[in-house]
Image: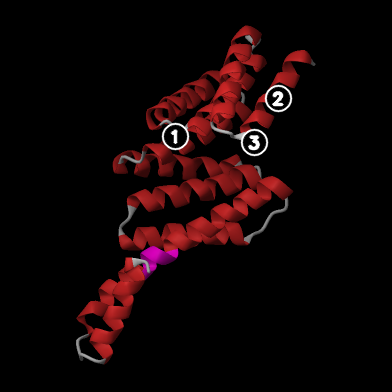
């Protein structure tokens, strides 16, 4: 049993049977934290389902919003940073709305940086880079994707490195640096194979099609 559920159970018993309600605020805090974790996890599952089916489920945004609110309430900046990132991802990826997405990524990056959460930092930087790419600012996009990749190398987040290299390859193709793009895609393919990240392998092959079209 999760310790937060156990704390809530003990708080209930202390209050009802022992006549001591002092443990109830701590029980509420733990349950809010647990609810935030669950909302974030369920929202991410819905996001993965969207990527597979391309069918929007508005509950995804509601879950990320709920998670962000609860993490802020319990004073968990790391959790809040993650939830804000995923809110941004919903707006950017599901609804193609950079106007709403970018400020969420920026706030996520700020919170994650202060919390020392390099993984969420890498996600926020990656998606800020994607927004810069779409907006026609390749140099800014390359800078953010490169910093995201540096963080992912530090973490040995191999599929994430491969995903970023594909993004950098698209930037290279768009700016006429096809040789660089091939090198990036070769490394991305090797990393995807090493980590059995078949989705990343498909991304590499799709990018390679741009080199021969």
Q: CA distance from mark 2 to mark 1?
A: 23 Å
State the image coordinates of residue 210 (x, y, percent, origin top left): 74, 19
For discs 2 and 1, the disc positioned in front in the rendered view: 2
Question: At 52% from the left edge and 40% from the top edge, which residue is drawn?
Answer: 102
SS of the residue under disc 3: helix
User: Label 3, on which residue?
Assistant: 199
User: Label 1, on which residue?
Assistant: 122
Query: Dividing the image into 4 quarters, which one contains the N terminus?
Result: bottom left
Part of the protein shown in magenta: 31-35
Q: Is residue 63 magenta?
A: no
Q: Quadrant of residue 37?
A: bottom left
Which one is earlier in the sequence, the residue at label 1 or at label 3?
Answer: 1
**Residue 38 shows in the view:** yes
Q: Judge whether 8 appears above or below 148 on screen.
A: below
Q: CA distance from mark 1 to mark 3?
A: 19 Å
Specify few, some or many for label 1: CA neighbours under 10 Å numbering under 14, 14-19, or 20 or more.
Answer: many
Q: Quadrant of residue 67?
A: bottom left
User: Label 2, on which residue?
Assistant: 205
């Amino acid at each position: 049993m999760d310790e937060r559920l156990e704390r809530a159970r003990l708080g209930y018993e202390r209050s009802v049977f022992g006549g001591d309600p002092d443990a109830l605020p701590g029980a509420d805090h733990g349950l809010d934290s647990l609810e935030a974790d669950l909302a974030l996890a369920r929202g991410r599952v819905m996001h993965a389902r969207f990527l597979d089916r391309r069918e929007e489920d508005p509950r995804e945004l509601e879950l990320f919003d709920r998670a962000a609110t609860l993490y802020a309430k319990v004073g968990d900046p790391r959790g809040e940073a993650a939830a804000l990132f995923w809110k941004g991802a919903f707006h950017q990826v599901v609804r193609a709305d950079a106007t709403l997405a970018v400020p969420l990524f920026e706030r996520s990056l700020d919170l994650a940086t202060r919390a020392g959460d390099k993984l969420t930092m890498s996600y926020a930087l990656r998606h800020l880079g994607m927004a810069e790419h779409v907006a026609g600012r390749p140099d800014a996009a390359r800078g953010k994707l490169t910093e995201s990749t540096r963080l992912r190398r530090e973490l040995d987040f191999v599929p994430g490195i491969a995903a970023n290299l594909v993004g950098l390859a698209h930037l290279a193709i768009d700016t006429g640096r096809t040789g660089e793009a091939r090198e990036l895609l070769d490394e991305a393919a090797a990393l995807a194979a090493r980590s059995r990240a078949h989705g990343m392998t498909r991304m590499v092959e799709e990018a390679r099609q741009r080199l021969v079209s």
